[in-house]
Image: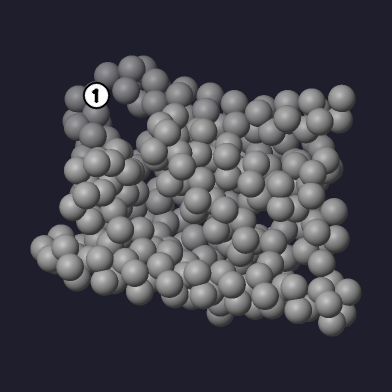
Amino acid sequence: MKTVGVIAKALLYLVIYAGIVLLTNRALYVWIPNKELHDWLADNPASLLVVANTIVLAVYILLLRLQKISFVDLGFKRPNSLTVSVGAGIWLGLFIAVFTQLPWMKEGYPEISGLVSFVTGGESFLVFVLGSLLLGSLLEEWLFRGMLLHVFRTRFNVYWSVLFQAILFGAVLMNVSVGIFAALGAIIYGIIRITSDSLWSSLLAHIFSTATLYVVSIYIKNWPSDMLLIVTIISGAALLAHLYAMLRGSYTKSVAVGYSPERNLN
């Protein structure tokens, strides 16, 4: 029964998010019959998330207070280190930018490239900063590496919890290829979260990843495929090295002083 309760609570968090996004979309496009507004929204699709995510965060804060779950419980506490987390975020952003521009990726999986365009696209830089860089990163980390990881940890160990939050993140996108790609990213942020024992680390990594993705995407549009492949390999290797260092450091610390990310997430 406890497992059923955990799953039900996790799904409730997701339903609240999806419901608010759908209602916000309907309000902006249907209840407000303004063609100029609709044209602007079409040019800046992330603007919808600026409104929706603000409302969602307010609802989540109220929900957490009702459940007597503190910000510290979610992981908003001093991180062990930020340097490696920032590095992992930068390499992840670079990897996503170049990998999704490879010819075979654009031709075979255009929906993944489309997701990247959604995150970085739009005519307004302010909308990108608010919608994708700040609120988008904050909400994703708050929900998946915060609330969902917290609720899963009441029933499962930390590694299964990281996997489950990643699966749910992929499922939300309702596309197999995009979902798998996004879930892998969620696992990376989950690793950063548990090894640093702080949601601030994964949030900062997410922000730097999105910022890097935005900047790099501007300059690689005319890069030859060979250059894209080389940078993909380099950034992928660097990202794996950062993740290995974080996992290794966490393991070494657990052996030396009896520290365990599992214990700290209980």
Q: Nearer the viewer, residue 226 or 161?
A: 226
Image location (x, y in percent) of residue 97: 30, 60
Q: Amino acid at mark 1?
A: Asn
Please indicate whether residue 153 sits to the left or right of residue 138 in the image: right
Q: Residue at x 26, y 49 (%)?
A: 105
Evaluate whether residue 207 shows in this view: yes
Q: Quadrant of residue 218?
A: bottom left
Residue 50 versus residue 2 in the image, above or below: below
Q: Residue at x 32, y 23 (%)?
A: 29
Residue 117 versus residue 259 in the image, above or below: above
Please indicate whether residue 111 sits to the left or right of residue 242 in the image: left
Q: Quadrant of residue 232?
A: bottom left
Image location (x, y in percent) of residue 41: 27, 35
Give the quadrant of the N terminus.
Answer: top right
Please indicate whether residue 185 sits to the left or right of residue 103 in the image: right
Evaluate whether residue 214 shows in this view: no
Q: Nearer the viewer, residue 62 or 230?
A: 230
Give the residue at the far bottom of this rendering.
256
Give the quadrant of the C terminus.
Answer: bottom right
Q: Residue at x 29, y 71 (%)?
A: 231
Residue position for label 1: 34
Neighbor class of circle 1 (other Cα within 10 Å; few <14, some 14-19, many 20+) is few
Q: Nearer the viewer, residue 74 or 232?
A: 232
Image location (x, y in percent) of residue 130: 41, 52
Image location (x, y in percent) of residue 265: 80, 56
Please indicate whether residue 122 sits to the left or right of residue 158 in the image: left
Q: Residue at x 83, y 77 (%)?
A: 255
Query: At numbered mark 1, what does the secondary structure look like: helix, strand or loop?
Result: loop
